[in-house]
Image (spheres, rainbow, N blue to C red):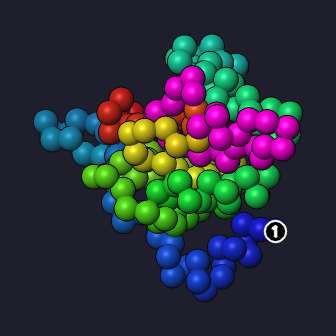
Amino acid sequence: MFLQSRITSTTLLNTIIIFNKPQLQFPLNCTDKNKAATCSSYYPTTSEFDGDSTTSCPDYFRWIHEDLKPWKSTGITKDMVERGRNVSHFRLVIVNGKVYVQNLDKVYQTRDVFTIWGILQLIRLYPGKIPDLDLMFQCGDKTVILKKDFQGPKALSPPPVFHYCGDENSHDIVFPDWSFWGW
């Protein structure tokens, strides 16, 4: 498989930060004992979902269908993901619940750190529920996958790049900036 062979290569491992052993504990279940908050380091290994989750998703999540529309009929290939490398700040790969990050370019302030932290929280909150994936992330303020660059009969499919912003003239896939919107 592409991801496994790519991740185990010596070259890539030298540029990847491995987050499978968290160094910081972000408490998820805190109680007040003797007026001092204490937090358990226990994290569940399974999770239960009750019913249809679409009824509890905020309204703005409906836009993901629009953002993914360019790939609806073709799907997303490894080549498409790779073509996003030149406009991305980092690549995030999840394999068997382990998160791997490859820095591709310098990022403004800590946008990448908060995105990675958010993904780690998802892994902790929903163990075994986050699928294996390979994503490219752009952390700047301007869209980078412009629709005009992917028009015409011989045009390639746009690379799927996640970004904190998008507009009607781009194919950037909007991803929440937790440092701004909160968790």
Task: Quadrant for residue 98, please give it.
Answer: bottom right
Main SS class of the magenta portion in the image: loop
Residue 125's x, y, as percent? 52, 43
Residue 96's x, y, as percent? 68, 60
Q: Is residue 87 visible?
A: yes
Question: What residue is shown at x 77% (from left), y 68% (from top)?
Answer: 2
Residue at numbered disc 1 = 1
At label 1, counting other C-alpha atoms closer than 10 Å, the crowd grade (few under 14, some 14-19, many 20 or more) is few
Q: Is label 1 in a helix, a strand or a loop?
A: loop
**As drawn, which residue projects farthest toward the bottom?**
10
Q: Is 65 placed above or below 183 here?
A: above
Give the magenta range: 146-169
Question: What residue is shown at x 36% (from left), y 65% (from top)?
Answer: 23
Side of 96 relative to 145 (left or right): right
Q: Specify the quadrant that holds the C terminus.
A: top left
Residue 141's x, y, as percent? 38, 39
Side of 127 relative to 88 (left or right): right
Task: Quadrant for residue 100, please give it.
Answer: bottom right
Question: What residue is shown at x 65% (from left), y 41% (from top)?
Answer: 149
Residue 38's x, y, as percent? 25, 45
Nearest to the observer: residue 106 or residue 123: 106
Q: Is residue 154 magenta?
A: yes
Q: Is residue 155 magenta?
A: yes
Q: Is residue 173 visible?
A: no
Question: What residue is shown at x 52% (from left), y 50% (from top)?
Answer: 137
Q: Specify the quadrant that holds the N terminus.
A: bottom right
Nearest to the observer: residue 113 or residue 50: 113
